[in-house]
Image: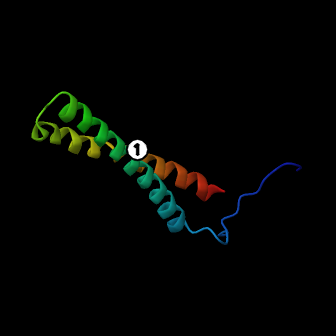
Amino acid sequence: MAGSTETTSEPRPGRHPAGVVAGTFGVIVLLAAIAYAVIVTVVDWVTVGWLAYPAADVAPFVVITGAILTIPIVIPTVLVSLKLAQK
């Protein structure tokens, strides 16, 4: 039948799942670290520098921001890894 594709379970040379996941994870963690650094700088500038809040009162929000950033690290890693593994 013209246009039909067969699926095989033969491994493809050159792409290892661990390598795909590690590479994707590394790129996404790097981007998240840059975003985290920017956010911490802005929060510090606004709250401590501009609004004159004590740094000790702002610190829990910085920690919470870091915890929340784990979500946009894990989800894109899984989605991009699956997409790359299918190619």
The answer to which image quadrant residue 47 occupies is top left
Residue in front for this viewpoint, 78 or 26: 26
Residue 53, compared with residue 66, is above or below; it is above
Specify the farthest residue to the bottom.
13
Residue 11, compared with residue 56, is above or below; it is below
Residue type, mark 1 in image: Pro
Instruction: Give coordinates of residue 35: x percent, y percent.
Output: 39, 44
Judged left or right of residue 14, residue 33 is left
Residue 57, compared with residue 10, is above or below; it is above
Judged left or right of residue 34, residue 14 is right
Instruction: Give coordinates of residue 63: x percent, y percent.
Output: 21, 45
The answer to which image quadrant residue 9 occupies is bottom right
Residue 34, compared with residue 44, is above or below; it is below
Q: Residue at x 43, y 46 (%)?
A: 75
Q: Residue at x 45, y 59 (%)?
A: 26
Q: How crowded is the residue under tag 1: few (<14 C-alpha within 10 Å), some, or many (20+)?
A: few
Q: Residue at x 28, y 46 (%)?
A: 66
Instruction: Give coordinates of residue 70: x percent, y percent.
Output: 34, 48
Instruction: Give coordinates of residue 49: x percent, y percent.
Output: 20, 34
Task: Determine which residue is flagged by label 1.
Answer: 72
Specify the farthest residue to the right.
2
In the picture, the quarter occupied by the C terminus is: bottom right
Q: Secondary structure at mark 1?
A: helix
Specify the farthest residue to the top.
51
Judged left or right of residue 34, residue 16 is right
